[in-house]
Image (tube, rainbow, N blue to C red):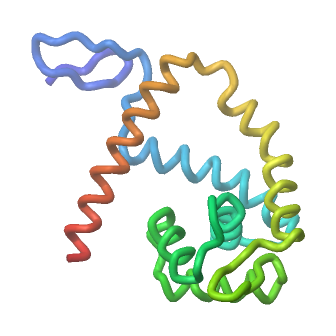
Amino acid sequence: MTTTTSGTATAPGTASTTTGPVADSRALALAHYAARGVLEHVLARHGITFQQQITLRAAVTAEAPRTPDDLVTDVQGSLKADPADIRVTVDELLAARLLVVDGAHLRPTDAGRELTAAVGAETAPVSARVWGGIPAADLAAAGRVLALVTERANAELAALSA
């Protein structure tokens, strides 16, 4: 291995095509936590947690009303959180009247929809500044890489959980 002036390692006889850091688990985690920190700052002003927002958003954006079990499964697939913890979160959202039970299903209330919209409106300008100016080709490449990393990590998690 040789190291380029940018600090990236390349195999002998190959040229580095990057001038910046190589994406890896640490870079992904740093980006995630930086973005999550911004979101959590906004959420704190509204008195809700990250997990509550993810759960509420899943209910608000669902094409059809979800049963409690379906909502827990959806959120667990996204957050990899303990289903028991997600059920507590659903109960918190019900107690806050952001979700309501409608027969066998959960529905977001008007307050839940308004909260989701308010959080989206507050984070939109920040997201525009964070993502703005990144070339479309770079975003497409990053999207492909992140989808592949997600697929592989989900497969590893499934194997560990089996």
Instruction: Please name whichever residue, 152 or 31, is drawn nearer the observer in this view of the structure.
Output: 152
Residue at the farthest left position: 12
Q: Quick check: 21 left or right of 123? A: left
Instruction: Please name whichever residue, 34 or 61, is drawn nearer the observer in this view of the structure.
Output: 61
Task: Indicate the position of residue 18 as horizontal and vertical percent values.
Answer: 37, 16
As displayed, is residue 118 above or below residue 121? below
**Residue sitting at x 87%, y 64%:** 45
The quarter of the picture where the C terminus appears is bottom left
Task: Indicate the position of residue 10 as horizontal and vertical percent values.
Answer: 20, 21
The quarter of the picture where the N terminus appears is top left
**Residue sitting at x 47%, y 25%:** 140
Residue 109 is drawn in which quadrant? bottom right
As displayed, is residue 23 above or below residue 114? above
Q: Quick check: 151 left or right of 56? A: left
Residue 147 is drawn in which quadrant? top left
Instruction: Please name whichever residue, 32 or 2, is drawn nearer the observer in this view of the structure.
Output: 32
Task: Indicate the position of residue 2 as horizontal and vertical percent values.
Answer: 18, 20
**Residue sitting at x 16%, y 12%:** 14
Instruction: Please name whichever residue, 158 or 58, is drawn nearer the observer in this view of the structure.
Output: 58
Q: Quick check: 70 left or right of 55? A: left
Q: Quick check: 20 left or right of 130? A: left
As displayed, is residue 48 above or below residue 105? above
As displayed, is residue 3 above or below residue 120? above
**Residue sitting at x 25%, y 21%:** 3
